[in-house]
Amino acid sequence: MLIGAIILAAGEARRFGRNKLIEKVGDKTIIERVLDAVKGVDRIVIVGKYYKDLMPYLENEVVVYNPNWNEGLSSSLKLGLRFFSDYDGVLVLLGDMPLISSETIKRIISAFKEGCSAVVPTYKGQRGNPVLISRKLFEKLKNLKGDIGARAILVEERNVCEVECGEEVIIDVDTPSDLASVRRLL
């Protein structure tokens, strides 16, 4: 199966107060850690408000600027889908999840079987990210509006497959205190 990855990195980081994706976690920035997790997967990075700050970290990436980044996550997701319209599925990664590993990505992709409209990673029963979405749902994703992602349509889907992963699938960086917590975990 042909799987692509959309890395969502266009947000405003309102709660963080500045561009969180270039903050260091260990010896790498948050965005570099996310990119490392999807090495070997066809991918696109959708940038927005902080594109100038991010570009030095994305020199070897396919990057699309979302001029409508302030309309919310759905506008970035739809841009990414255009790039992968002929793929079997897309993995949607949030740019602010620095603990996602390549092992987690492989586990999610391996769980994508015939009959799965999506694969959602879980940790102790709690749904997390990144989510792998089948091409069967691309049209529904194209109809999303505002600051909502795939979760809105997955709630109604019957054939969502789940795969148990580690805690990294529920940990993101929204605030400076989240960043401090993530740094303590490493």
Image (tube, grey):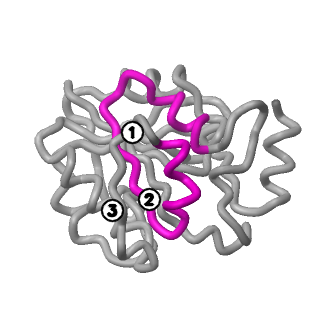
Q: Quadrant of residue 91?
A: top left
Precedes in sequence: disc 1 or disc 2: 2
Is the residue marked by circle 3 packed among few (<14), some (14-19), or many (20+) residues within 10 Å?
Answer: some
Between marks 1 and 3 in the image, the one whose residue lies nearer the viewer: 1
In three-dimensional space, the C-alpha distance between marks 1 and 2, rounded to whole angstroms, equals: 11 Å
Are dots 1 and 2 in contact, CB under 8 Å?
no
Drawn side of residue 52 relative to residue 43, left or right = right
Q: Whole-percent x and y of residue 17?
A: 73, 71
Screen quadrant of the C terminus: top right
* Span of residues in magenta: 31-58
In three-dimensional space, the C-alpha distance between marks 3 and 2, rounded to whole angstroms, equals: 23 Å
Q: Amino acid at mark 3?
A: Ile
**Callout 3: SS:** helix
Is the residue marked by circle 1 packed among few (<14), some (14-19), or many (20+) residues within 10 Å?
Answer: few
Residue with the mark numbered 2: 47
Does the segment drawn in magenta span residue 56? yes
Q: Quadrant of residue 30?
A: top right
Does the segment drawn in magenta span residue 43? yes
Extreme-left residue of the structure: 86
**Callout 1: SS:** loop
The residue depicted at 86 percent of the width and 49 percent of the height is 180
The residue depicted at 69 percent of the width and 34 percent of the height is 28
Q: Whole-percent x and y of residue 98?
A: 65, 40
Q: Amino acid at mark 2?
A: Val
The residue depicted at 19 percent of the width and 54 percent of the height is 82
Q: Is residue 44 above or below residue 114?
A: below
Residue with the mark numbered 1: 61
Q: Is residue 60 above or below residue 17?
A: above
- Which label sits on residue 181? none
Precedes in sequence: disc 1 or disc 3: 1
Residue with the mark numbered 3: 153
